[in-house]
Image: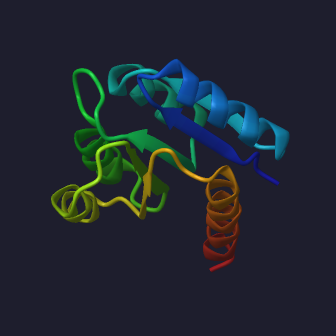
Amino acid sequence: MLKQKILVVDDLESIRDLLHDAFLKEGFEVYTAESSEEALPIIYRENIQVHFYDLHLPGMNGIELCRAVRKKRPVDLIFAMTGHPSIYALVECREAGFDDYFIKPFDLRIIIENTKRAFETIKRWKRQ
């Protein structure tokens, strides 16, 4: 069975550490990056399947990162994270190809549940 790999991209170290530790505790293989530019090589090298991107990143933002990744990895599940929610941001996220949208501060239980569901979906899709 393939390892269940997650990437968390956030410029805040506290968010990266929080999610890294929570996912690790659940048995996932976790990678972190503080920018899109740092994330892209990890995504392609490590065959990441589930992604969490902050929308407000330095350089290439989370929306742009999602669009770039979707072109090469259309089946991956990608989740947006933001501390600045708006209906405009939500619509832009959906148009960019995000699968879901989480508002900070978020409930870790909901993040973990959605992540487990994402890997179940990927497993089901690969049986096709």
In the rendered image, the residue lying farthest to the front is 105
Is the image coloured rainbow, by chain, by secondary structure, or in one colour?
A: rainbow
Q: Which residue is located at x 23 percent, y 29 percent?
A: 60
From the top left corner, tell me how far across and down residue 110 is, in percent. 64, 61
Q: Nearer the viewer, residue 105 or 78?
A: 105
Q: Nearer the viewer, residue 30 or 81?
A: 81
Relative to 115, does residue 68 appear above or below in the rendering? Answer: above
In the current view of this chain or complex, which residue is farthest to the left?
88
Image quadrant of residue 32? top right
How many callouts does the rendering have? 0
Is 106 placed left or right of 3 in the picture? left
Q: Residue placed farthest to the bottom in the image?
A: 128
Residue beneath the point at 42% across and 41% down: 53
Quadrant location of residue 7? top right
**Vertical placement of 13 versus 44: above or below?**
above
Position of the C terminus, as image quadrant, is bottom right
Picture coordinates of residue 11, whole percent (x, y): 41, 22
Q: Is residue 14 left or right of residue 41?
A: right
Identify which residue is drawn at 31% across, 60% down: 97
Query: Looking at the image, is 34 positioned above or below residue 6?
Result: above
| 96 to the left or right of 124 | left
Q: Residue at x 61, y 53 (%)?
A: 107
Quadrant in the picture for the N terminus: bottom right
Residue 31 percent coordinates (x, y): 61, 29
Which residue occupies the foreground of this view, 115 or 12?
A: 12
Relative to 36, residue 51 above or below: below
Q: Position of residue 63 (x, y in %)?
A: 25, 45
